[in-house]
Amino acid sequence: MSKEAAIHHSLSSFPSAAQVEHSMKEVGLGGQSVQSLTHDERQRILAHLNSNGNIDEAYQSPSSPNGPILSTALYSEDAVLLNPTATIPKYGIVLKSARDGDDGTTDLIDEEDESEMSRQEAHILKLTRTLKDKQVIIAPGDGKAPYVTNETDVVLVDRALMPGDIVQDTSAQQSSKGSGVIIGMRQSASLQQISSGFEIKDVDTSRISYSTDVDVSDYVVIEGGWVGRAVGCAEQITVQFLDLSTCVVRYPDLLEIAGDVDNNSFLKTQRSVFVNGLKCTISQLVTEELINFLCFRLVAGLNVNCPPECLRDGRWTRGHFIPRKHKIGLVIDSQTILVTVQWLACFGSNPSGSPPPEKVPRASVRVLMGSWCSYSFQLGDKVVFKDEEDAKRTFPITHAQAATGLPSHQFTLNVTCTKTWADVLWQDGSVSTGIYSTNLLPVLSPDEYELWPCEIVVLKENQEKLGLVVSVNAIDRLANIRWYETVNSCMVLSSTVEELSLFELETPEHLDFTAGCIGLVVDEDTPEVNRLVEILRINRDGQVVVKYMLSNREGVLPPSSIFKIVEDDDDGDSESDDDDKSWVTEEDGDEVELDGRTIDQVEDSVIKVTNTLETMDISTPSSPLPKRGTISVPSQLPSWDLFASSESIPIDHKYYNSIQRNIPRALAKRILSEHSMLTKALPPGILVRSFEDQTDAFRCMIVGPEGTAYEGCLFFFDARFPLEYPSVPPDLFFHSYDGGLGKINPNLYENGRVCLSILGTWSGNATESWSPAKSLMQVLVSIQGLVLNPEPYFNEAGYDSHRNTPDGIRNSLLYNEKTLMLSYKFINHILRHPVAPFEEEIKSFYYGEGWLKIMVERGQRICVASETPVDTAAATEKSAPPHEIKTVSLGCVKLLKKEVALLDKMLLVQQDV
């Protein structure tokens, strides 16, 4: 079978170009290009093709749960058809979609970083920077360079999914059942034998495995009971040449996959060559089209260019090195000899012992195959059959092959097409089975409070009480929970179901038993062979179904008996408190060590910066402030002193215990300049207090801007100038009163961290980063105008690309109702525990200007409208200001009512005075 015929055979489930053109005419779309068709028009064409039997059962009409939709919404790792009307269709993989979002890090990669990238990485980076809305970067299956195209120019044919993924249904029933979690999968693949071109369709992927015996991200165990994850592999490559000379190469990293073999003059002189020990004609050789696509591991059957240094110092098992003859060879064996491992935990008899070395011989570790690895294959993967007899039945062995003695299952196969089906457990508790992957949309950024059935949860106010989610009302944000009870020393679920707000619940990390994660059985009496488990699922009775990874059998355990192994997350988004040790000074002595330097040394560095600012008028901003058009301060504000000085720093100030008594002269001069600017230029809604006993420290109050969920709330920050200020940004701490319910803003953390590029606590472009010409006032104005905005959800890195999308709009509204509820919680705390030295300002704002009454009436209005049928609620909503949040979910109402009731009591007490 020729290469073209083999590819056409694998894609025969797709209609021909003539069939597509005929269907276009029949539905009234004749004469148009496929690229110009809308989503609905593509659906009509697909339905017509199906009605005429031009699509096989795996590709049914859009209304079928087992068939695809002609979706124009594409995501990373989607498999797509590149030429819908061509006679011989071609596939590709989406490397990146504009829908995936961008955290801005691509803008931070400088020329030096780019110089260290491979040519392909640099090319993809360049494409990423030019990616526009509804565009994707495609990696063609023929090995050509990735390129950017519109989503409408390709057709989605399969979607990469894994158990535990959160998805949405594309059908009209989505809103009633909510999103879902994948609990089961099935996949088939079309496979082409690299050496012969022979192909077979729709092979169940449970019959195949990757051609490499260990790969990056595989779990491995070693003697002594340590489990880890492979993070790197070193391979031994054996190459055979046309004269049958064979060499184990010295530097396998220098080998490169050869180009088009048919055009190589050296090979053209030969009528046949050997592939995997088999005699093949030139036309049967693997070509660039089959080997270049996403091939980063050298597997048996690949043609490679061999630099002289790889062969000269190699180990020749047959023949010897002849430079003029040995230039291009064929990989006949590829073995992993060394594995780099990140060791995670010990389940052996000596858990307190030291972990094994990072690099270990391949023979010393055992690879643990996850239960779901059989459903993760993609276009371009190199695979082999698990069973030799299965391979013989699938790919008939010839007499010539039999004579070599090489088992058929060792022949490398190329994945040319995949079809994936999933079973989904929806939030309402229902289950759908066998949904074709393209009828599901990935949920890339689920709301932080979302839950799904069969998740283990705790009350945020009582972490020791465990419960199981029965079902979730995604619209009302309510969950039905059954709590665990101990009966005869066993954990069982109570028969009582309690309805709770999603805001009150959370899944602790150590109980987040996602399918595929691993854990240790904590029962000391458990045999070592059964201590390491893989989580498969949580049953509706609350028990956890596991696979004992060393004995390869299944079992059921209570959740309390499993210790989940949590791997390190190096995403750089740690919420830990910033270290203050560099700024702590001693009360005695004139000089204090700071990172190995003295106060005098620090002062010298500050003077250098200050000297460059001598001619600069620091009393006015030296770089642009956030656009004032985006900041709307409430009109009902008292006549405050925006900047003033207090006698002493409050004892609850973040930097009270880190007094810098020996402030350099240059810093003292800069502090006076900052004071002058704060006195003259502070905008309304921002109040700053300095302290006579600690001149480098400040406490700031920001009034929540009008037209946001923060309106009527006050926010407090502690600031301090480090000794090296202004060469470094000020230290800033946020006072959060969330009560354990989460962040009130993506940039303001519960532990006090303020995440802003101007502070150097978040990546940003050069214009947003700190410079000595900037000031504390600019930091505060950035918070007021850029952080406390009407749509804080989009402050999260990468989420701005979701703006104006259905998911983005929904998640933004959900985030705003959480922000509103937390704002009421903040107000309650502030009124019960006034923040010094702003006690009088807080009193005048809430009582003198009537903001307490405004907030109580607003909260009551929102709760009534939210609990009222839509038609009746319209009149209530009309009475609300245009910018005000009109309604919230019933889950939010549950908590909001409590906060409003507490404020109402304070209001009544104040009115009685």
Image (cartoon, helix red, strand yellow):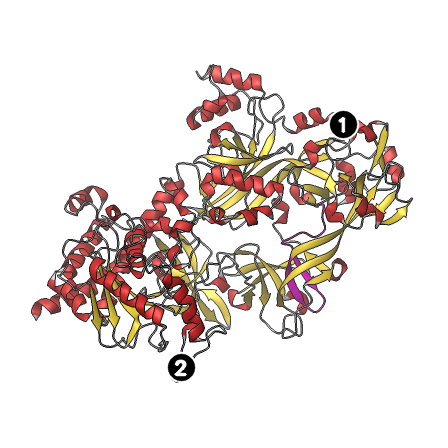
Q: Position of residue 805 (x, y in %)?
A: 38, 40
Quarter of the picture containing the C terminus is bottom left
Image position of 182 with respect to 9: above or below: below
Q: Secondary structure at mark 1?
A: helix
Which numbered disc, 2 or 1, marks the residue that appears first in the sequence? 1
Residue 263, numbered label = 1
Say the numbered circle drawn on residue 590.
2
Q: Residue at (46%, 39%) from the top-left corner?
A: 98
Q: Please state the horizontal and vertical placement of residue 601, each as a whole percent of the image.
A: 45, 72
Decide which of 492, 651 is in the foreground and name it. 651
Label disc, if present, on residue 137 of the rendered structure: none
Answer with the quarter of the image where residue 185 lies. Answer: top right
Q: Which residues are magenta?
A: 211-230
In this rendering, the answer to whether 395 lies above or below 578 is: above
**How far across and down, in percent of the image, does residue 619 sit?**
26, 59
Q: Which residue shows up at 59% across the image and 66% down it?
A: 520
State left or right for residue 305 relative to residue 487.
right
Q: Residues within 10 Å of mark 2 (few under 14, many from 20)?
A: few
Check disc 1 and give the amino acid type.
Asn
User: Which residue is located at x 31 percent, y 61 percent?
Assistant: 776
Give left or right: position of 757 versus 374.
left
